[in-house]
Amino acid sequence: MVSAPSASAWAPGNCPQGTFCVWPEFWYGDTDTPPSLATEGEWSGSAPGHIFYNNTSRDVTMTYFVAQDEGQGAAYTACVSSGHGSYFTVPMSVTNVAWREDDGSPCW
């Protein structure tokens, strides 16, 4: 597993309500580090990431790659529940954020 399990107590940092955020660096507690990605809806592109937080009212599916693979390696997906966040154990590039289609599987 390339990301840590989500923690419901994870702080949203400086991610505004209604926004999904990714930060390029590790941090603990409050931060003034600007997110590499802050989106209020579905998004695609490439954003460096170590930490992510879903400060929206909906679950999202996030797609990401190991940064050192430069998008050439395996793509991973994770469901991120509303009000939850976590961190990657190695640097990642987040490439897509989409509203989750509920297939009955758990969303962490």
Image (tube, rainbow, N blue to C red):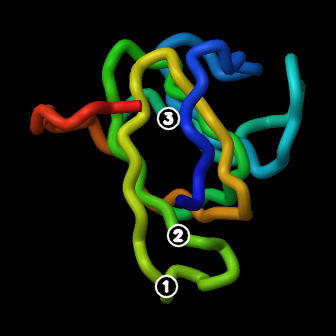
- Picture quadrant where residue 47 is located: bottom right
Residue, x 12% and y 32% (percent of image)? 104
Quarter of the rendering occupied by the C terminus: top left
Q: Secondary structure at mark 2?
A: strand
Query: Is there a contact, CB below 8 Å, between mark 1 and mark 3?
Result: no
Question: Local crowd at mark 3 within 10 Å, few (<14), some, or many (≥20)?
Answer: some
Q: Tell me: residue 87, above or below residue 64.
A: above
Question: Camera-side residue: 15 or 75?
Answer: 75
Residue, x 40% and y 25% (percent of image)? 81
Q: How many marks?
A: 3
Under mark 3, the amino acid is Thr
Measured from the top left, where is residue 27 in percent x and y? 87, 35
Q: Tell me: residue 53, above or below residue 17.
A: below
Measured from the top left, where is residue 57 in percent x and y? 37, 13
Under mark 1, the amino acid is Gly
Query: Is there a contact, CB below 8 Å, between mark 1 and mark 2?
Result: yes
Work out which residue is located at the far left of the displayed protein and give it.
Answer: 103
Q: Which residue is mark 1?
A: 73
Question: Camera-side residue: 67 or 107?
Answer: 107
Query: Is there a contact, CB below 8 Å, between mark 2 and mark 3?
Result: no
Q: Which residue is mark 3?
A: 39
> In whole angstroms, how far apart are the C-alphas of marks 1 and 3?
25 Å
**Which of pointers 1 and 2 lies earlier in the amino acid sequence?**
2
Q: Is residue 80 left or right of residue 99?
A: right
Q: Is residue 90 left or right of residue 58?
A: right
Residue, x 53% and y 57% (percent of image)? 94
